[in-house]
Structures are given as C-alpha cells and as structure tokens.
Amino acid sequence: MLHKVMIPLLVSVICTQLVKAEELTNLSLDSALNIMRNNNLELKISKFNEQIKMQEAKMAKGYNYGKLGLKLQAMRSNDAGNVFGFKVKSREASFRDFGFSDFMGAIGQGAQQAQGDFGAFSQGLAQQGGNILGIEPKDLNYPDARNHVQTTLTYQVPLYTGGKLDQYSKITKALTYMSQLDTEKLLNEKIFQTKKTFYDISLIEQYIDKLSSIVNNIDRLEEIVESMKEEGYAKDIDKLEVEARKAEAQSMLDQATYNRELAYQYLSFLLNETVSSIQTLDNLAPLPKFSKEDIIQNNLDIQKAQLGLKITDMAIKVEKSKFLPTVGAFGEYGSADNSAFNRFFEKDFYTVGVQLEWNIFNGEIDKNSLEKAKIKNMQVQEQVELAKAGITLQIKKLMTNIKSKDAQIESLETQYQFAEKVYENYEGRYKEGIASITDVLIKQSKELEVLLKLLTAKNDRNAKVFELTSVLNKGENS
C-alpha cells in the first residue's frame, strides 16, 4: 500500500525537477521580461524589504491602541513583611496578624491581677505600659510560611502625545512607500539590463554571422591563391598572408562566441532560469516618447526626493510635539489569594489612573533638535530642485548622445556597404593580377574595422535608449 502512494509521489517530484531544469529556448523579449519580474532574486529580496517596512508601519500604528497585559505570579515566603502583605492583598488580615494576641494576653494578665479593681488596673497599666508596648508579637514577626498567587490584568493607553504617535505612523507609512519606489527603481534597472542583454546577444549574433562570412571569403581567397600559385601567378608569401589573416579572423570568431556565451549566462542570472537561445532583434531599440511633464511626474529619483521632503515635514512636527505634554491612562484589575483563582471575585481589586508628563526644560536640547529638523527640511527642498534639474540635464545629455549615435550609425552603415564593395572589387582585381594579396587583405581589414565600429555604435546607442527609458520610468511599455 505504501508503494502505491510513494511511487506516484516520486514520479511527480522527478518530473517537477526535470521541468524546472529545462532550458529556455527561442525566448522572446516580452517573455523574458515577464520571467524576470517573477524570478529575479534581487527583486524578491527588495519585495521582502517592502513587507518588512509594511510591518513596521503596522507596529507604529499599533502604539495608538495601548497595551494589555496579563501577569500571573506565584510565590511562597515566611518573610514577615511579605506574609503580612500577602494577607492584606488577599483581604485576610486580622488583628492576630498585628500581634494582638500577645497584647491582649498582657492586658488580660493585668486585669486578673487587679481582681476587678479598675483603679488598680489603671495604675498597673500606667506602670507596665512601656513593657507591654515593647512586646515583640510572635504572630507578626514569626508568621508561618504562606503561598501567594496573584493574577493581574493591566491596560495602558496613550490619550495625548502632542501628535507624536500620529506623525510616527505617517513616517513609517511613507517609508513603506519609499521601499516600493526602491523596488520599482530596481525593476527598471533589471528591465534595462534584460533588454540590453537581449540586444547585445542580437548584435553578437550579427557580428558572428558577418565574421563567418568573412572567414568564408578568406577560405575562397585561399583557394584562389592556391589556384593562382599552381599557374605561377602567386607566391608562397601570398598563401602565408592569407593563412595568417584566416587565423586572426577565426580567433575573433571564437572570442565572439565566448562573449555570446557570457551574455547568455548573464541573461540566465537575471531571469534565474537557464536560457540557451533567444529570438534575436534586428532593429535598433525604439526611442521612448515623453514630455517635460512626464519627467517630473514619473522619474523615481524625483518622487523619492519629494517623498523625503514630506518626511522631513513630519519630522518637524515630531520635534514640536516634544514641547507638549503627554497624557496616558492605565487600568488594573486582578485578584490574589493563597491558591490560584480561589474566590477570585470575592478578593478582586482594581486601580485606575491618569498620568500627565510635561518636559519643562532640558537645556534647550528640544529647541535645537527642532531647529535641526527645520534646517534638514530646507536642505531637502534644495535637493528636490537639484533632482529635477539634474534629471532634466541627464535626459538632455542622453537625447544628444542618441542623436549623435544615430548619425554615426547612418554614416557607418554607408561606409560598411562601401567597404564590402571595395573588398569584392579588389578580390576580382587580384584574380586579374592587378592588385596584390596585401591590397586585398588591407581592404578586408578595413571592412572588418568598419563592421566593429558599426556594431559598437549600435550597442552604445541601445544602451543610451534603455538608460533613458529607465530614467523616464517607462518600464516595459516603451
């Protein structure tokens, strides 16, 4: 019977692990972004920080409701003070506990000696009064050990704190929102990195494709040289030059392959999933559309600066509250006896009270703290303006860089097309014996040089576009 249950369970676990270990192939950018949002480890950690801040906000709000506590004490003592206190607390104290048995014994003895003569009794009491008062009562000083069990329910609540608790609650709530902005900013960064890696891989694929074509061209050139050598139109040095260029091109192709592998590893890290292939992107990254109002409203750094300003406003109110009194109330209800819950309501007790506390003078520390909070508020006001100006400048610089790269890419694409044609032309001229193999290889080097510049310019341009998108907080909708 156990096998019938365990075998399907084991099969299910193994299948789950196999699915989890399956590599992602032909992955689209949209799918990658969705996976990254759910799987990225840094985002998960940031979301945990959000939850921590949310709990701290709830904790701050909870102080407004006061504190209710239950305390159960169980003790045993033969200490005279404790035993007497226990009996009073239990409402069981008697005159005997005060030592009246010894006192009454002395009085009774005096009355017996007076034999009913009140005058003699009074005279004897006056003479022996000091001795009687000096008696150390055994019941009071040497009581039997006693148990004491006390149950107490206590409630304390702040009635007025000068607005301090209210402001603390607002500050922790603002800090919760601040943590959400931090997560959103981190998400923008991960979107930026994911998109950039996708485009990096796509450009590397283009580079590998072009390099492969160049290697094929060198192979064809090598065959031409070999053929011309047989006919006496080429030399051994020509063949060596071609072989050297082929080795160089193959090395560059190998390096590009390793770079593609590293890019896939980084993409896998971002997605927390193994990615083996993607749907490459042939076009340049689209430029996001935005207005000046979008910058102020959407940029996360500006939002954080504005939120920080609100928090400093709250901090000023907290400092002002120190000049106001605090009022609190408390109530206590309980019962005590020599055993737990024995005649609980017969021996119960209560205490209620109100406390006002007002700090009149503390060396002007509170005054200086208030001034410090006001100065901090003015500092943050300037930081908000600085953030707006800085972000606006950053966006202008990014737009200028993108436009510059667009112009450079357009020029390099024209240069690359020309370099390809020149190489093909010189290859034909070599066949005709008009150009040397060195001339052909120089033109091929120029083609490769322009190709590298073109792909680098595209990569730089895409990076600036993604950075702009991140600054604008456009996310995946750009």
Image (cartoon, rainbow, N blue to C red):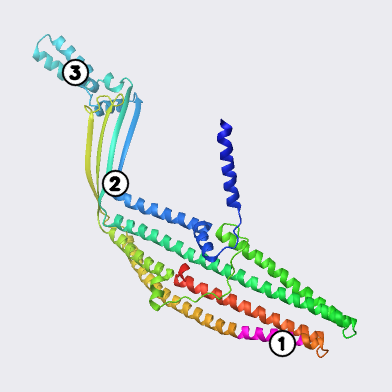
- Crowdedness of circle 2 by 10 Å Cα count: few (<14), some, many (20+)? some
Mark 3 vs mark 1, foreground winner is 1
Q: Which residues are magenta?
A: 411-426
Residue 418 included in the magenta stretch of the image: yes
- What is the secondary structure assignment of the residue under circle 2? loop
Q: CA distance from mark 2 to mark 3?
A: 59 Å
Tell me the chief SS of the magenta region. helix
In the figure, is residue 119 to the left or right of 215?
Answer: left
Identify the residue under disc 3: 128
Q: Position of residue 297 (x, y in %)?
A: 38, 72
Q: On residue 298, which mark appears?
A: none
Identify the residue under disc 2: 66
Name, please, the residue furthest toward the top: 115
Identify the residue under disc 1: 422
Q: Which residue: 35% across, 52% down?
A: 58
Q: Which residue: 53% across, 80% down?
A: 402
Residue 440 included in the magenta stretch of the image: no
Q: Earlier in the sequence, mark 3 or mark 1?
A: 3
Identity, as a three-letter code, of the amino acid under mark 3: Gln
